[in-house]
């Protein structure tokens, strides 16, 4: 069987992150996982809702990500919400650590996927949005949707 390169199989996405945060920089990171975690992910079972990355020493750790126990696992099954180590290059790690040291910057996972057989997480440096920013973004989205709808209705009437 030929190995396909560059293929991405999505597992989970954190849709609420783009609503709650201003995304500044995005990096792809690897994850250190156990066997039953990988099997559970291959079934498409994971949640990034409460997940965030934290700096401990010179390493980044992903906390709060929920990977449910593998149904056919034995006593070797994993703990669903354990902290998982993130794998990054040194320069990317230094850049992320420097960004986190700034006031109000968080490391938020945006998506979890398999790439070339390896589990990857898309990690972003983000600043929290205020409530009025969220309302403004929602109003802009609705206005552009209505304008697009009116434009499509107008072109449909001509035909």
Image: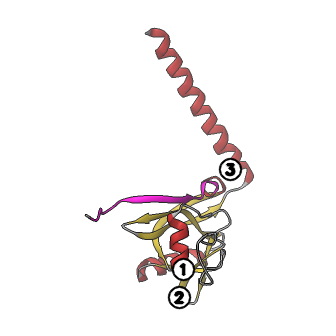
Task: Indicate whether residue 13 is drawn in magenta.
Answer: yes
Q: Which residue is mark 3?
A: 133
Q: Which residues are magenta?
A: 2-16
Q: Which residue is mark 1?
A: 97
Q: Which residue is mark 2?
A: 58
Tell me which label, 1 or 2, sits earlier in the chain.
Answer: 2
Tell me which label, 3 or 1, sits earlier in the chain.
Answer: 1
Does the CB distance between marks 3 and 2 fall below 8 Å? no
Circle on res. 43:
none
Query: Where is residue 138 drawn, in percent x and y?
Result: 66, 42
Does the CB distance between marks 1 and 2 fall below 8 Å? yes
Q: Nearer the viewer, residue 52 or 78?
A: 78
Front position among marks 3 and 2: 2
Seen at 42% across and 83% down, the residue is 90
Seen at 49% across and 10% down, the residue is 157
Q: In the picture, which quadrant includes the N terminus?
A: bottom left
Q: CA distance from mark 1 to mark 2?
A: 8 Å
Residue farthest to the bottom? 57
- Element at badge 1? helix
Q: Nearer the viewer, residue 55 or 7?
A: 7
Q: CA distance from mark 3 to mark 2?
A: 34 Å
- Does 122 appear above or below 53? above
Query: Where is residue 38 drawn, in percent x and y?
Result: 51, 72
Task: Indicate whether residue 7 is drawn in magenta.
Answer: yes
- Element at badge 2? loop
Front position among marks 1 and 2: 2
């Amino acid at each position: 069987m030929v190995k396909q390169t560059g293929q991405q199989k999505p597992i989970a996405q954190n849709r609420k992150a783009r609503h709650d945060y201003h995304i500044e920089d995005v990096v792809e990171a690897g994850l250190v996982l156990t066997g039953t975690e990988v099997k559970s992910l291959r079934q498409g079972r994971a949640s990034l809702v409460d997940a965030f990355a934290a700096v401990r020493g010179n390493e980044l750790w992903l906390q709060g990500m929920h990977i449910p126990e593998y149904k056919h696992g034995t006593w070797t099954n994993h703990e669903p919400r354990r902290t998982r180590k993130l794998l990054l290059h040194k320069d990317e790690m230094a850049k992320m650590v420097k960004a986190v040291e700034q006031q109000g910057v968080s490391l938020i996972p945006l998506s979890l996927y398999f790439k070339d057989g390896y589990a990857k997480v898309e990690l972003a440096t983000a600043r929290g949005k205020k409530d009025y920013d969220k309302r403004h973004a929602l109003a802009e989205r609705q206005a552009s949707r209505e304008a697009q709808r009116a434009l499509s209705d107008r072109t449909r009437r001509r035909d």
